[in-house]
Image (spheres, helix red, strand yellow):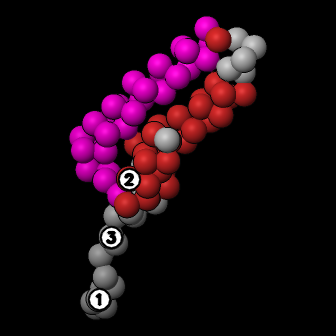
Amino acid sequence: MAINKSRPKKPSKLSVYLYIPNIIGYVRVLMNVYAFAICFSNKQLFCILYFISFVCDGIDGWAARKFNQVSTFGAVLDMITDR
């Protein structure tokens, strides 16, 4: 009779780059790049995209606390996108 002495499997830890708040941050970066690329040709779309980015700033902070996905990388990404 063999005794199984293998270690129990640990649940895989989600990479910090795939945290929900960080994904929101990536979308914000892309949205802002596009918004500033078209800011002189389409001011209305620029305003809409910039406002959505502003709202997403609050949502990513809420999601980080809600899902306990707070990270240094996320904090830096948030500071960069806020600029």
Would you call the spot at circle 1 few (<14 residues within 10 Å), some (14-19), or many (20 or more)? few
| SS for callout 2 | helix
Left or right relative to 10: residue 25: right
Q: Which residues are magenta?
A: 44-71
In the displayed structure, 11 sits above or below 49; it is below
**Residue 75, numbered circle:** 2
Left or right relative to 42: residue 68: left
- The location of residue 43, given as percent across then percent down, is 64, 11
Would you call the spot at circle 3 few (<14 residues within 10 Å), some (14-19), or many (20 or more)? few
Is tag 3's residue or tag 2's residue first in the polypeptide sequence? Answer: 3
Q: Callout 1, which amino acid?
A: Lys
CA gap between label 3 and label 2 equals 27 Å
| Circle 1 residue | 5
Task: Please name the residue shown 53% across and 34% down the image.
Answer: 28
Q: Callout 3, which amino acid?
A: Lys
Q: Nearer the viewer, residue 12 or 62?
A: 62
Task: Please name the residue shown 40% across and 43% down the image.
Answer: 21
Left or right relative to 78: residue 7: left
Is tag 1's residue or tag 3's residue first in the polypeptide sequence? Answer: 1
Q: Nearer the viewer, residue 71 or 9?
A: 71
